[in-house]
Image (tube, rainbow, N blue to C red):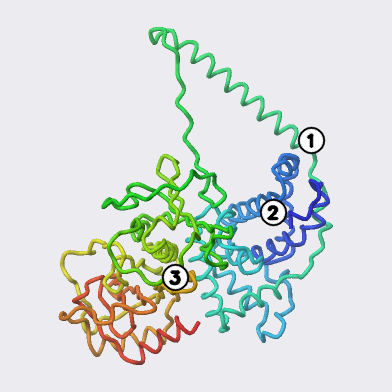
Amino acid sequence: MARQWAEAPGFDEYVIARGSDLLRTAWLLTGDERGAEGLARATLDAAYPQWSQLVARGAGSYDAELRRALVTTYLHRSRRRRPDALPTSSRTPRPPTGSGLRSADVWHALDELPRQQRVVVALAVLDGLGDTQVAQALDAATGDVRRLREHAVSALAHRLHVREDRVADLLDALVPADPPVDALLARPPRRATSWRAVRDWVALLAGLAVVAVVVGLVGPRGGGGDVIPSPPPQTLEPLSCRTNAPPPSPPAASAVPLHTRYVAVLVCAQTDEGSVWENSLPPDEPVTAPQALDALVLDPRGAPGPCPALPEGPAFRVLLRSADGSLTTWANEGLACNGWPALAHYYWALAEQGAGPAVEADGFLGCPSTLGTPSAPRGRAPSAPTTSAVAGLAKGTVLASATACLHPAVQLQAATPPSFRAVRGAVLGAPALAQLNADLAASGSRRGPRLACAGGPWTYALRARTSSGRVVELTSGCAREFAVDGHARDTWPVSRETTSMLRALLVAN
């Protein structure tokens, strides 16, 4: 929207054009008209004194900066007052069109979300922003935002008993389509802002004077040496396909893990006539997780190994950033099999870095990364076993909570690049837990042959907490038998009902 301005807009012009969108986002965050106007008003009041500097940054910065300020203000206020403390009487009374649900039901489901998940829902689902834009507003990693969005939408759909693709319609109908912006046009008084600026300048000058006096007193006692200030810490710009990178160089084969040399890897499309396809490449998001970096296959051309019959011709570049900020560029035509396996594993790693081992405070167990587990397809970096002894899963174990996850398995195709699919997770409800516990009542894990169904189009992962508090991870390529905590010779077979339940929950959606 900001690109439509032929010249830098004035403050009132921008509020008239975009204030209603800011109000809709604030309405979904706060839950009522008064709270939305107060949140939007506070955001604009803070932006008004710096409006000239903001517009000087160019088109595209208005929405992003105000969005970030809105989110920061909301999260700061929410620490002092939970959103569910807002009065429901002032909320919009109309029910979502055609849903059969009362608006109070949807508001209640939103109020049960943690603060960050509510922000992600407002920006990603209601406003339609991408995960990268939401991550910039939250100062968070894109993978974390993707995981929060998927979990929040799944939780709302579960609480409202609707399909996940209906959540966006419910939220859109919950807030006014075009709220008036009259209350946002009143400018804040300049006197308070000017006095605050004068006070800040006085404090800054006084601080500089004190520093000058201290340096003057300490300097001569140090043997006449000058006081050399330490250089400020280096701030690296986010790695992007628009980053100025050096010309491509041939990759060098090395047995050293990739994450010991680089901290981020990004694949960028080449759009000239020499490109072998016109489809999109991965999103402009670097792989930064150490284990995901090690999973990339970046062997030079001529390396041993089978290569499928894939198209020839340049298609993309690989940007690699070192810890000191220096960049290296590899061209795909310099990689084994013309670089297509590198692209496939990049998609793979991009999905996997969104999965993390952390267990959140709200009970969501999270999706564990399957990099290096026995059920993962070949080519991934090995990971150390969690324990030296196999604990197993005893018969009669009771699971108190569990999360089911579906990890994509990249498959090379001859005509097109692989498609990107993020790791998908869903919290198991009471019926699904009962099904798992019924299987555990019948049999536990067994020691014996290695996991038979290690490969498949997907990797299923279950992270569960037992009634005794133990967290166990189960992985499989077919959802018929699972490796317990990454041990390929300690497997737990499940019933057909459990297999069908997991496939219906994760694959069908």
10 Å crowding of disc 1: few (<14), some (14-19), many (20+): few
Classify residue 342 as left or right of residue 302. Answer: right
Q: Residue 274 or 284: which is nearer the viewer? A: 274
Q: Quadrant of the N terminus?
A: bottom right
Q: Which residue type carries mark 1?
A: Arg
Q: Secondary structure at mark 3?
A: loop
Tell me if residue 235 comes above or below residue 384 in the rendering. above
10 Å crowding of disc 3: few (<14), some (14-19), many (20+): many
Residue 97, x across and y down, in percent: 72, 82
Q: Which residue is mark 3?
A: 423
Classify residue 410 as left or right of residue 59. Answer: left
Find the distance from the CA under tag 2 to the CA under tag 1: 27 Å
> In terms of sequence position, does the residue under pointer 2 or pointer 1 come before the other?
2
Q: Secondary structure at mark 1?
A: helix
Q: Residue at x 40, y 61 (%)?
A: 342
Classify residue 456 as left or right of residue 71. Answer: left
Find the distance from the CA under tag 3 to the CA under tag 1: 52 Å
